[in-house]
Amino acid sequence: MSKVLVILTAGSVHLQTVQYTCKQSQALQSAMTNVAIIYYSTYGHIATLANSVKAGVESVPGVKANVYQVQETLSEEILTKMHAPPKKDYPVATAETLKEADAILFGFPTRFGSFPAQVKALFDSCGGLWAAGALVGKPAGIFFSTGTQGGGQETTAFTALTFLAHQGLTYVPLGYRAPELFNMDEIHGGSPWGAGTLANGDGSRQPSKLELTVATTQGKSFAEVAKKLSA
């Protein structure tokens, strides 16, 4: 009988330990700073940058990142004529995605020095968040791609600041945290506004190692700020 009691007692202890561990895990998850990386990409350049940004974000303890893509509005016929590759297998961002995140990084290519209509459609769907003040105080950053060196490496981010300002989001620029921005030995994208890449007008140029390094740095530095603000 005493042997049976010992087994039951041990089982009870084991059960309590499991329950405690589960509670610890739940507390840890709720304490994590959740960064949403929301991007739009036609030829995949921004998707590639987003992966490097994500790696930088998740290099900071206590911060996790989830990648989302903006809903495409072009038809399959148009995309085929543009020779656009298939979309990545990421969930589509909605206004709820922005609401649930603790911090947000937006990535998009330029369209004549501004951000694409697809991104504008997402922004315009956030009227309810604006009315409720749901995004006020959340950190936000931007990364981008252009076809040429002077094609909007600053204005593409600048034009998106109107959305950030009206929503009360706290803009976190890259600044010169990435020393690679001072590199004059090769042509590259990126600016104090955020990480960037040069895609060529036909999308033939892929992000360089330098540009991906800058993207990782932006993710890391942004995550550090987001973690402090959400503490």
Image: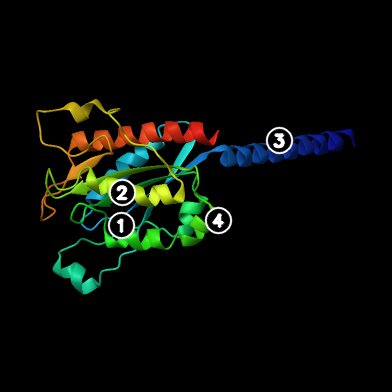
71 with respect to 28 (left or right): left
Q: Reading the chain from its start, which is encountered first: label 4 or label 2?
A: 2
Of the two numbered discs 3 and 2 in the rendering, the one whose residue sits closer to the viewer = 2
**Mark 4 and 2 residues: CB-CB less than 8 Å, in contact?**
no
Residues packed near mark 4 inside 10 Å, few (<14), some (14 to 19) or many (20 plus): few
- In percent of width and height, residue 156 lies at 24, 48
- In percent of width and height, residue 87 lies at 28, 60
Which label belongs to residue 17? Answer: 3
Of the two numbered discs 4 and 2 in the rendering, the one whose residue sits closer to the viewer = 4
Residue 136 to residue 229: above or below = below
Residue at the image point whose x is 30% and y is 40% from the top: 52
- Do we see residue 225 in this rendering? yes
Disc 4 residue type?
A: Ala
Q: Secondary structure at mark 1?
A: loop
Q: Whole-Å distance between the Cαs marked 3 and 4?
A: 42 Å
Identify residue for label 4: 132
- Do we see residue 47 in this rendering? no
Residue situated in front as seen by the camera: 163 or 225: 163
Residues packed near mark 2 inside 10 Å, few (<14), some (14 to 19) or many (20 plus): many
Residue at the image point whose x is 32% and y is 50% from the top: 160
Q: Whole-Å distance between the Cαs marked 2 and 1?
A: 14 Å
Residue 176 to residue 156: above or below = above
Quadrant for the C terminus in the image: top right
Identify residue for label 2: 107
148 with respect to 19 (left or right): left
Disc 2 residue type?
A: Gly
